[in-house]
Amino acid sequence: MKRRRMIDERGRKRDDGRKDEKRRMREDGRGMMDEKKTNKIRTVRDLKVYRKAFDSAMEIFKLTKKFPKEEKYSLTDQIRRASRSVCSNLSEGWRKRRYKAVFLNKLTDSGQEAAETQTWLEFSLCCKYIDEDTFQRLDDEYEHIFAMLNAMENKVDTFCRPSS
C-alpha cells in the first residue's frame, strides 16, 4: 500500500495520519496540539497541567467530604490547601511570567505543593480514608503533574514573555 503525503496547516509534510499520537503530544504543560486548534495559550486555564491540577484538587475536595469530622482542621484542611495551591501558584506565576525568576519560583512552589499533596494522600490511605485504587490513581496523577511542571521549568523561555 502506497503512503500518501499530506500537508498540515503549517505547510509541513506529514504522512497519512497513521503516525503515533505521541508525536503531537507536548509534555511541557501546554497540552496536545490538535489540527483544528492553535498552540496559542491565552490564559493559565489553557495549560493542560493547570486543568489536571484543578481537576485533581476538585476530586480531592469531593473525597475529603467523607473524611471524619475530627480530621476537619488537620488532614482534610491540609490536603485541600496543598492540592489547591498547585493551581494557585501556577496562576500567580503565569501572571508574572515576564519575570523569569518569579515564574520559575512559582513553578517550583507548585511542584512542592504537588509533593505535599502526595504525602497527605499517603496519610489518607494509611488512615483508611481512601482505598488503594484511589490513592494509586491520584498519586500517579500528581506524578504526572510534577513531571509537566518540571518540563515547564526546563523550557521556561518558551513560556516567559519578554518584559517591554
Image: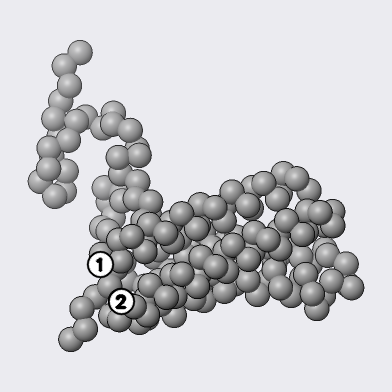
Query: Which residue is labeled 1 in the image?
Result: 157
- Do the CB atoms of the residues marked 2 and 1 lie less than 8 Å apart? yes
Q: Where is residue 147 drawn, in percent x and y?
A: 46, 54
Q: Where is residue 154 drawn, in percent x and y?
A: 33, 60
Q: Earlier in the sequence, mark 2 or mark 1?
A: 2
Residue 30 visible in rendering: no
Residue in the foreground of this view, choosing between 108 and 68:
108
For the residue marked with disc 1, what is the amino acid? Asp
Q: Where is residue 69 drawn, in percent x and y?
A: 88, 72
Q: Which mark is residue 100?
A: 2
Quadrant (top left, top right, bottom left, bottom right) of the N terminus? top left
Residue in the foreground of this view, choosing between 33 and 79:
79
Is the residue 64 above or below the residue 101 in the image? above
Q: Residue at (72%, 44%) from the top-left corner?
A: 133
- How far is disc 2 from disc 1 in space, using C-alphas? 8 Å
Q: Residue at (17%, 21%) from the top-left corner?
A: 3
Where residue 97 sits, quadrant-wise, is bottom left
Quadrant (top left, top right, bottom left, bottom right) of the C terminus? bottom left
Is the residue 31 above or below the residue 92 in the image? above
Q: Residue at (59%, 72%) from the top-left corner?
A: 84
Q: Is residue 43 left or right of residue 87?
A: left
Q: Residue at (28%, 80%) from the top-left corner?
A: 98
For the residue marked with disc 2, what is the amino acid? Lys
Residue 155 visible in rendering: yes
Is the residue 68 above or below the residue 31 in the image? below
Q: Is residue 77 left or right of residue 32?
A: right
Dot 1 falls on a residue whose secondary structure is helix
Where residue 79 sits, quadrant-wise, is bottom right
